[in-house]
């Protein structure tokens, strides 16, 4: 559709605001305007397709951060997993060419409103470079919004001090020494990358060439760290080295080191909130309340879904935000946690993540509340103004077996 208008809807803009009884005007893949129905512009209905959806809800395309979606198809089949590389230090490895646009998993995720993902490599110390991908394209070149938004560093973790190992002094001392040694290795790589001058090297070191970008003010360094000590050590190390834009990923114990997180204003990619507490001395709702804690402390955060079967479970991303809302997070803040905030953290907010004039027309229309599993029913979805086919293999199988056993139409 070259030009169209969706009207009569509730717009959840993704920036913490909403508009009741609103319209969205799209022209050549860009949002040309958005506002309330009493201020709707008069358009030529012969040249503009009018889509009336009274009572429906419109959301910006949700963004699945820190996921292997598109890099894996069947976890139990090793040949379909393309998210790790041999070796420990691979900052130059990009996930972009490995992204599989014909994945059968992607349409199942898209049907719940997840239209953009951050494809992230795994394993080692420096896993590689992630990419931000549209979830509807012919190939990875067409899918890529950016092929290099940041480098991922898996910070070493010491065993939880609540375990019996704290009583095994020799073993604990050994682990402590290994931990300190790995931090020294990280510091050395960062220092070498910062001073690296490729013009003086006959054969440029691709690893240092990639890693030096975390000092350019644009490229993120994603720090995968969970415990209080790891978070403190990671932030101190990278800020001391001069890294310009660190992002904490996971950061389960960030409330214990709020002082340093707030001091630096470090963005957070919070862990999957549908998880068990990290220890016996934590409340049952510990993970559920993390988004509220981040919101109340005015931290920039988004919700991500790393864990078992994370690619398939990306379709549950809106329901993670819904659960956070049930535990106190305001509704529009919950929407922003998987749209506008995620776009800001990954650096694509100039075009994506919110419904605003001048931004990409990447949004969807739902019959009801998209954060509620019973009412998230997409009727329309667009990426860059291009309408999507909302169909997947699970729908086909559902319809097939309904007919086979004479159970009627879905």
Image (tube, rainbow, N blue to C red):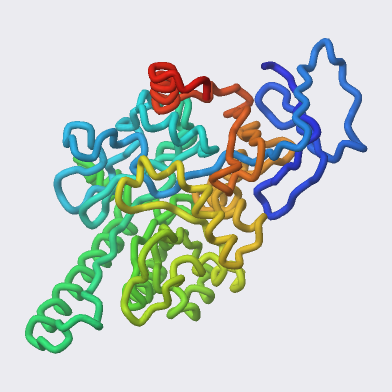
In this rendering, the answer to whether 22 lies above or below 272 is above
Farthest front residue in view: 406
| Residue displayed at 31% across by 46% down | 309
Q: Quadrant of residue 165?
A: bottom left
Give the number of marks.
Answer: 0
In which quadrant will I find the N terminus?
A: top right
Question: Image check: 197 left or right of 393?
Answer: left
In front: 160, or 308? 308
| Residue displayed at 37% across by 76% down | 232
Farthest left residue in view: 170
In this rendering, the answer to whether 75 lies above or below 44 is below
Residue 209 is at least partly visible in this image: no
- Residue 408 in percent (x, y) is at 50, 20
| Residue displayed at 16% across by 83% down | 164
Question: Image check: 100 left or right of 361?
Answer: left
- Residue 9 in percent (x, y) is at 76, 37
Question: Image check: 167 left or right of 380?
Answer: left
- Residue 83 in percent (x, y) is at 26, 41
| Residue displayed at 72% across by 41% down | 356
In this rendering, the answer to whether 86 lies above or below 269 is above
- Residue 138 in percent (x, y) is at 42, 19
Residue 27 is at least partly visible in this image: yes
Q: Quadrant of residue 296?
A: bottom right
């Amino acid at each position: 559709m070259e030009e169209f208008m969706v009207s009569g809807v509730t717009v959840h803009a993704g920036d913490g605001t909403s508009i009741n009884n609103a319209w969205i005007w799209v022209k050549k893949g860009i949002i040309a305007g958005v506002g309330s129905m009493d201020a709707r512009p008069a358009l030529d209905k012969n040249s503009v397709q009018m889509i009336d959806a009274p009572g429906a809800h419109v959301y910006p395309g949700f963004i699945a951060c820190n996921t292997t979606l598109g890099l894996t198809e069947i976890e139990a089949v090793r040949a379909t997993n393309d998210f790790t590389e041999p070796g420990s230090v691979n900052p130059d490895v990009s996930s972009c060419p490995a992204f599989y646009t014909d994945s059968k998993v992607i349409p199942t995720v898209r049907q719940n409103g997840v239209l953009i993902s951050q494809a992230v490599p795994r394993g080692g110390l420096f896993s590689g470079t992630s990419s931000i991908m549209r979830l509807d394209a012919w190939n990875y070149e067409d899918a890529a919004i950016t092929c290099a938004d940041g480098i991922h560093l898996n910070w070493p973790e010491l065993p939880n001090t609540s375990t019996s190992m704290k009583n095994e002094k020799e073993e604990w001392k050994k682990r402590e020494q290994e931990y300190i040694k790995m931090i020294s290795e990280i510091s050395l790589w960062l220092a070498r990358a910062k001073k690296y001058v490729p013009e003086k090297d006959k054969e440029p070191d691709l690893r240092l060439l990639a890693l030096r970008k975390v000092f350019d003010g644009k490229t993120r360094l994603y720090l995968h760290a969970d415990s209080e000590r790891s978070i403190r050590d990671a932030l101190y190390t990278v800020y001391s080295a001069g890294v310009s834009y660190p992002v904490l990923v996971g950061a389960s114990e960030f409330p214990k080191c709020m002082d340093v997180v707030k001091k630096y204003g470090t963005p957070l990619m919070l862990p999957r909130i549908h998880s068990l507490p990290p220890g016996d001395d934590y409340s049952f709702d510990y993970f559920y309340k993390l988004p509220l804690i981040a919101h109340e402390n005015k931290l920039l955060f988004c919700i991500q879904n790393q864990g078992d079967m994370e690619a398939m479970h990306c379709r549950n991303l809106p329901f993670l935000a819904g659960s956070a809302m049930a535990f106190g997070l305001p509704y529009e803040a919950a929407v922003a946690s998987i749209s506008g905030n995620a776009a800001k953290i990954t650096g694509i907010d100039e075009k994506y993540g919110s419904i605003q004039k001048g931004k990409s027309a990447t949004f969807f229309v739902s019959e009801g509340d998209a954060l509620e599993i019973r009412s998230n029913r997409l009727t329309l979805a667009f990426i860059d103004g291009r309408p999507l086919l909302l169909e997947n293999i699970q729908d086909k199988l559902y319809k097939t077996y309904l007919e086979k056993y004479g159970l009627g139409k879905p």
